[in-house]
Image: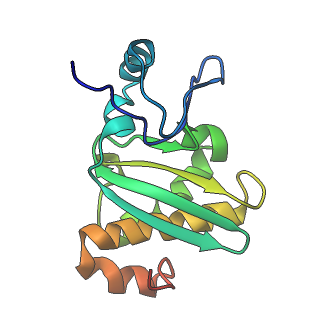
């Protein structure tokens, strides 16, 4: 019998806002079915992609960038719920500067520090997304640096 996979992130059920699997927890059959319904299962167990970190003032972000369908999940919730549609478009600016379509990439991660949805958290997410783009496409580093999205070398 194959061993059950473990979740890479903590996921919240968007209908009940309750945690249904935590990072490192073995995924049960019921949770697997729910993750598949929400189309999050591959993100929950797939180790593929590039992980990068970003920070600004008191906020820090960690994102995993994977080629996909344009899903943006932050802290287990769709990003539009946390930041609003207009603010989320600002967070996606590193894709525009790099000449990439944000709709072809899945971004999953977490952000902490400062106030939820604050400017510092948005900038930390921009920094982390830009770092993940550079891991995929090192030649985009200069353009992202000049635009102000990469200011640290890590």
User: 70 or 57: which is nearer to us?
Assistant: 57
- The residue located at (29%, 78%) in the rendering is 140
Give the position of the C terminus as an image quadrant. bottom left
User: 100 or 150: which is nearer to us?
Assistant: 150
Q: Residue 35: x and y, percent?
A: 41, 23
Seen from this angle, which residue lies furthest front?
A: 1
Seen from this angle, which residue lies furthest left?
A: 1
Q: Residue 146: x and y, percent?
A: 44, 87
89 left or right of 34 in image: right
Indicate how the structure is coloured in the image. Answer: rainbow
Q: Residue 106: x and y, percent?
A: 36, 46
- The residue located at (54%, 69%) in the rendering is 54
Q: Residue 12: x and y, percent?
A: 58, 29
Q: Quadrant of residue 14?
A: top right
Q: Quadrant of residue 90?
A: bottom right
User: 96 or 127: which is nearer to us?
Assistant: 127
- The residue located at (52%, 66%) in the rendering is 126
Vertical arrangement, residue 22 with respect to residue 143, above or below: above
Give the position of the N terminus as an image quadrant. top left
8 left or right of 89 in image: left
Vertical arrangement, residue 49 with respect to residue 21, above or below: below
């Amino acid at each position: 019998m194959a061993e059950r996979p473990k979740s890479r992130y903590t996921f919240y059920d968007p209908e009940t806002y309750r945690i249904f699997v935590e990072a490192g927890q073995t995924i049960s059959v019921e949770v697997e079915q729910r993750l598949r319904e929400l189309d999050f299962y591959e993100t929950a167990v797939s180790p593929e992609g590039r992980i990068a970190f970003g920070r600004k003032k008191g906020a820090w972000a960690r994102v995993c960038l994977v080629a996909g369908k344009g899903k943006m999940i932050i802290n287990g919730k769709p990003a539009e719920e946390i930041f609003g549609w207009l603010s989320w478009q600002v967070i996606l600016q590193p894709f525009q500067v790099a000449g990439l379509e944000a709709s072809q990439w899945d971004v999953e991660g977490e952000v902490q520090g400062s106030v939820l949805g604050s400017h510092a958290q948005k900038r930390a997410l921009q920094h982390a997304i830009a770092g993940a783009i550079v891991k995929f496409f090192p030649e985009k580093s200069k353009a992202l640096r000049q635009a102000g999205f990469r200011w640290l070398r890590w």
